Amino acid sequence: MASPISLSKDEFRLLTWSRPELTRMTIQPQSLQRLCPLDNGLFQPRADYKANNATSFSNIGDLDALPLEIIHSIFSILDLRSLTDFRALSWRARALVDSLPPYNEIVHHSPDALRALLSTHMAVHFTAQDIFDALCTQSCFGCGQFGPFLDMFTGHRRCITCVAYSDSRSEERRVGKECGSSVD
């Protein structure tokens, strides 16, 4: 009769992979689309509104005196929540924000990322360029493997392994540092 193999806790953890519940760690696109609709592309000013109210359509106050390049520079340092709020001011403001390349790319290619950031109130922490750069990378920020998920707290791409074990390992490291030992 063969003797049983004894494994330490760490060896057993490395040889097995527990299946994480993805639904608890991700935001489902169906609920995002229902609960956080975006108006991008849905509403356009009527032709008679443009003709009769040309001055109010194109007026955004003192910002109209600035060239488009400077307006884009200003928008590039604003967070996503501020850009979204500014879009609601007027048709002209909407057109200016929509003309910002990173914001436009996010809206067209990954609107659920914008919805998730807005609905979790994390949009105030990231610029459109930050999220655009994260979405343009393929690798996980933690391990370098393919990262299909966007971490709403850090704005980085993550793989399923880093998402599943980030909480437990970071907690182990924190406790290990407090106790003066190393856990890895």
Image (spheres, rainbow, N blue to C red):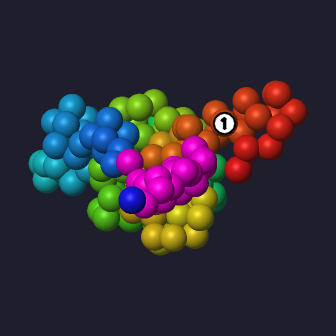
User: Does the magenta run of residues contain 6?
Assistant: yes
Q: Is residue 50 visible?
A: no
Q: Position of residue 92 (x, y in %)?
A: 37, 48
Specify the farthest residue to the right: 180
In the rendered structure, the answer to whether residue 76 lies left or right of residue 53 reads right
Q: Which residue is mark 1?
A: 172
Q: Position of residue 142 (x, y in %)?
A: 60, 59
In the image, the segment drawn in magenta is 2-18
Give whichever of 95, 177 is nearer the camera: 177
Give whichever of 121, 43 is nearer the camera: 121
User: Does the magenta run of residues contain 37?
Assistant: no
Give whichever of 47, 156 is nearer the camera: 156
Is residue 51 depicted above or below 102 in this figure?
Answer: above
Q: Position of residue 161 (x, y in %)?
A: 47, 56
Q: Residue at horizontal 16%, vertical 49%?
A: 42
Q: Residue at horizontal 55%, vertical 51%?
A: 6
Q: Residue at horizontal 22%, vertical 46%?
A: 29
Regarding mark 1 in the picture, which secondary structure is present there? helix
Q: Residues within 10 Å of mark 1 (few under 14, many from 20)?
A: some
Q: Is residue 23 visible?
A: yes
